[in-house]
Image (spheres, rainbow, N blue to C red):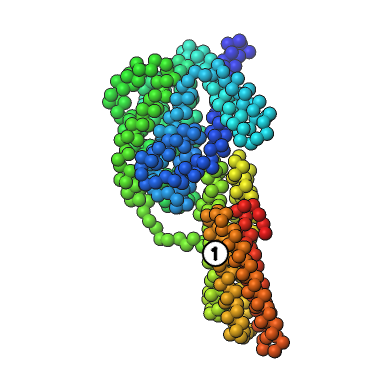
Amino acid sequence: MPETTWGLLVDIFKIAGGLGLFLYGMNLMSHGLEVMAGDRMRSVLEKATSNRFFGIGIGTAVTAVIQSSSATTVMVVGFVNAGLMNITQAIGVIMGANVGTTITAQIISFKIDPIAPLIIFIGLVVNLMIKDNRVKNAGIILIGFGMLFFGISTMGEPLKEFAKDPGFQSLLTTFEHPLLALLTGIVVTAILQSSSATTGIVITLYASGVGLDFMITAFIILGTNIGTCITAILSSLTSSRESKRAALAHVLFNVFGSVFFGTLVLLFPGILTIIQNTWPEASRQVAMFHTIFNVTTVVLLVGFVKQISKLVHMIIPEKAYESENSQRLIYLDPNIMQTPSIAVAQARRELCRMMKITRDNLELSLDAFQKKDIKKAEKVLEVENTVNFLHRNITGWLVRIRGLGLSMQDIESLGMMLHTITDIERVGDHAENIAEYVVLEKQKSMKMSAEAYDELKVLSEAAMDSVNHALETLETLNMDNLGKASIYEKRVDEIRDHCISKHIQRLEGEMCEPLAGVVYIDMVTDLERCADHAMNIAFSIKGEKV
């Protein structure tokens, strides 16, 4: 093989390897930052208010910390889907995410690649030598940070050699049309699902002096802002209409910004000349264009948040209400797996939804029993299929999420949910049993004394109090509720003992039909078990099973 051909291949291998290191390093750093900041980040986003400026600030801060506007936008879609954030709030946070993502380009534009191997070494030592998970995660962040710059350094030298090659220079002329450059930015970013990664690659190419025109570079950067919308779009596909509106708002905002600024640059190319004259370093020019473009777009559109909200509601109008009791997952879909912290939060919301459905079904079964309503009993049996569906599918999701890189708090939260979901499903089984007693009573013309019905009504109310309190505890994670949970459970036990005592008296006095007596005891057992499971659900928030 000729030496020149071998040298060309070596350069190509170096570029490919450097690109791989860069992308993997960025992914590693972003993931590590997300795990470290996940819990705080989630709570900060949940506190976003209708004040658009506060939302922009939150979006900027969170994205600057986790180095991923895609992750922030996916979280926003998740919060909208869960009803924790409305479209107006979401638009503000999305605007902020676009500003926050410019921090990545600014970091990449700094010339710190000579010390990249040292950063990797320090991160490796920290990760291997320290046992504390938080410190180990900091080591992973350092490794990713170092690999990112080491990849840039590895790509840089062979790219400079390619810059001297006439064939490579003629290849770059295919990008001379701004529209083609814009399309390139869109496609590459959509494939990588990271505008930061595409921007980093463009900065490296431009700084290597390969002959890429600044105008063309600018349009590739504009394209990355449109391409990054793909992540939010994918995240919203299987979610609620509100989530789809949030994703659409992201698309409209980014498309308008890219088209407006692209038109401005074509009409007034002097804008790029000013940037080049102000920042002589090539990498800094690209980073500053990226920042100026995103900040300008936010400034232009911040006054039109409500109008954007109205527009997305016009494009995606309301549809007929779909019952929450339907056999589907509302808060969980494959796209949230990209963001482990939001996946955990969404799983807990799905679990609370299952608990609400189960609670309502138990209440319906008790109403059917007291009123001897066969139609209500049949409805209970129908809803029980939904409870079983949720039990199977949420459990599967919890196992999948457990395999992601999670913070210790999220791991503990998942453990709590895996314990809790079985107790919720058991409560559903007891509701099913009670509905079947109604059917049996109808079929066998069974008669139970009015006194027995009254006793079961008192026990039913106490059991429902226990289940309602468990649901409240699960939703609020309020440790102060645990003392009251014990009181409710003890009260159920006391009423159960009273019911059994009265039942024995009726048996001794031959005042009870045999079949009615069996149903009465089974009913007492079902209600007492519901209270036991409710106690377990309440105490699961502190990792205990009573």
In the drawing, does residue 63 fall left or right of residue 141?
Answer: left
Q: Residue at x 62, y 52 (%)?
A: 542
Q: Nearer the viewer, residue 120 or 539?
A: 539
Residue named by callout 1: 468
Q: Secondary structure at mark 1?
A: helix
Q: Identify the residue at the far left of this view.
A: 267
Q: Nearer the viewer, residue 79 or 452?
A: 452
How dense is the environment of label 1, judged by Cα within 10 Å: few (below 14), some, or many (20 and up)? some
Q: Is residue 219 in view from this perspective?
A: no
To which quarter of the image does residue 419 belong? bottom right
Can you give x and y, in whole percent of width and height, for residue 355 in the image?
Answer: 56, 60
Q: Residue at x 42, y 49 (%)?
A: 85
In the drawing, does residue 503 fall left or right of residue 335?
Answer: right
Q: Residue at x 57, y 38 (%)?
A: 35
To which quarter of the image does residue 153 belong? top right
Q: Identify the residue at the far right of this view.
A: 508
Q: Residue at x 59, y 45 (%)?
A: 410
In the drawing, does residue 11 fall left or right of residue 55?
Answer: right
Q: Is residue 199 above or below residue 480?
A: above
Can you give x and y, in whole percent of width and height, for residue 503 in the image?
Answer: 67, 82
Can you give x and y, in whole percent of width and height, for residue 320 in the image?
Answer: 40, 60
Q: Is residue 310 above or below residue 144?
A: below
Quadrant where the C terminus sits is bottom right
